[in-house]
Amino acid sequence: MSINTTLSSLPINTTRNANGNGVMLSITITAIYNGITGIIALTINAPLAYIIITRRTLWKIPHIRLCSMCFTSIILALLYCLPYPWISSSPATSVLKIIQKPLRNFLLASFCFHLASDAVDKVVIIAFPFQYKSFVRPSIVGLNLTLVWLISLFVSFYPIISPLRRKSNVTYLTGSISEEANYHYVFYSLCIILPYSVIILCHGYLFVVALRHVRNIDYQQSKSMEELKRGRQRIIKKFRAARPLIVTSVVFLIFTVPYFVCLFIAFSLGDLPWEIRKKHLGVLMNALKASSYGLRELAFSYPAYNPFIFILFSQDLRKEIAEFLRISRKKPLLQSASTTRMTSTHLI
C-alpha cells in the first residue's frame, strides 16, 4: 500500500466499510464547502485581477505579485473547487481525477513561493531603501514570477510527467512506499519548508530591525520631542509596507500548518514496517481523518480569503476598487439616460 493510498483512500475506505452513509454525507459536505470556497475565490480574485491589469496606477510590484496569486486561485476554483462533485464521482482514469492532487500541490507550492518572494521583497525595501529600484526591477520581478510558476508546476505535476507514471493497479507513483515517500519528502521540503523558513527568517529580520530603531530612538533623549515624534513617524511609515506580509503569512500558516503536521505524521508512520505501524495505528488514523475531513479543506480555502487581507492594507487597491464600483454603478444610469434622450428625440 502506497503513501498516497494511506493519505487519501485509507480513511475513506475504512469509513465506507463501516458506514457508507457517513462517507456520502462527508463527501456531500466537502463538495458544498469546496463549492462555496470556489465561488468566493472566483468572484473575488477574478475582478481583483481585472482591476489590477486595467489600472496603470496599480502596476506596482506588490500588486503584480498579488495578480499572479489571483490567477492561481482562479485556476484552483475552476479546476478543483467548483467541479469537486464531478471529480469525486468520476473514474480514476478521468483527467480531473488524475490532476486533482497535483493541482492541490501546485496551489500550495505557488502560494508559499509567492509569500516567500514577497517577504524577501519587503526585507530589500527596508535593508536597502536607496538601492531597491536597482535591485528589484520589473524584468527581475517578471522572471521571478515565471520561475515560481514553472517550479511549482514541475514539482507538483512531476508524478504525471515523469516516467514513474501511475499504473492501473496502483495509486500515485509505482506503489512503492519508499519512492512515493521520497517524492513527498522532496516536495514538502522544497515547496513548503524552504519557503516557510524564508518567511520566518525575513520576519525575524524585520523584528530585529524594528527593535534596533526603537532602541536608537530611546537613546536619543537629548533630542526634542518634536524630532523624536518625526523619527517615530518615519519608522512607522517605513514598516507599514511590511504589515500585509506579516498578516498574510501568519494567516497562511494558521490555515495550512495543521494540515501539514497531520500529513507529516501520516508520512512518518506510513513509511514504517507494518509491525511498528500497527502499534501507532490510532495516531495514524486520527491524523488521516483530520487531514481528510476538515484540515485539507481549511488549507485550500486560503485563496478565497487572501485578497481581503491585501485590500485591507492597500490604500491604492481600495481607492481603485471604489472607483471601479462607482463607474459600474454609473454606466446603467448613463445608458438609461441616453436611451431616454434618443426616444424623446424620435418622438419629436
Image (cartoon, rainbow, N blue to C red):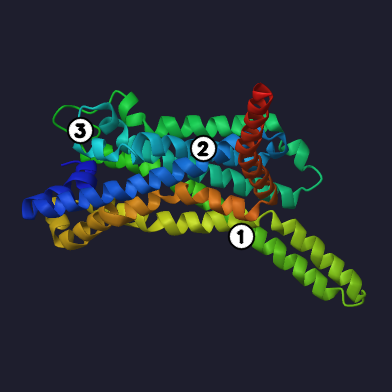
Q: Residue at x 20, y 36 (%)?
A: 176
Figure quadrant of the C terminus: top right
Identity of the residue furthest to the front in this view = 348
Q: Residue at x 68, y 29 (%)?
A: 341
Q: CA distance from mark 3 to mark 1?
A: 46 Å
User: In the picture shown, does residue 246 fall above or below 91?
Assistant: below
Residue 162 image position (x, y, % from top left): 33, 25
Q: CA distance from mark 3 to mark 2?
A: 27 Å
Q: Which mark is residue 204?
A: 1
Residue 256 image position (x, y, % from top left): 41, 54
Relative to 229, 139 lies left or right? left
Q: CA distance from mark 2 to mark 1?
A: 33 Å
User: In the picture shown, does residue 342 fall above or below 28?
Assistant: above
Residue type marked 1:
Gly
Q: Is residue 190 visible?
A: no
Residue 333 image-quadrant placement:
top right
Q: Which residue is mark 3?
A: 90
Q: Which mark is residue 46?
A: 2
Which callout, 3 or 1, points at the residue further toward the start of the chain?
3
Residue type marked 2:
Ala
Relative to 291, 322 lies left or right? right
Residue 67 image-quadrant placement:
top right
Asked whether the beta carbons under mark 3 and mark 2 sit within 8 Å of each other, the answer is no
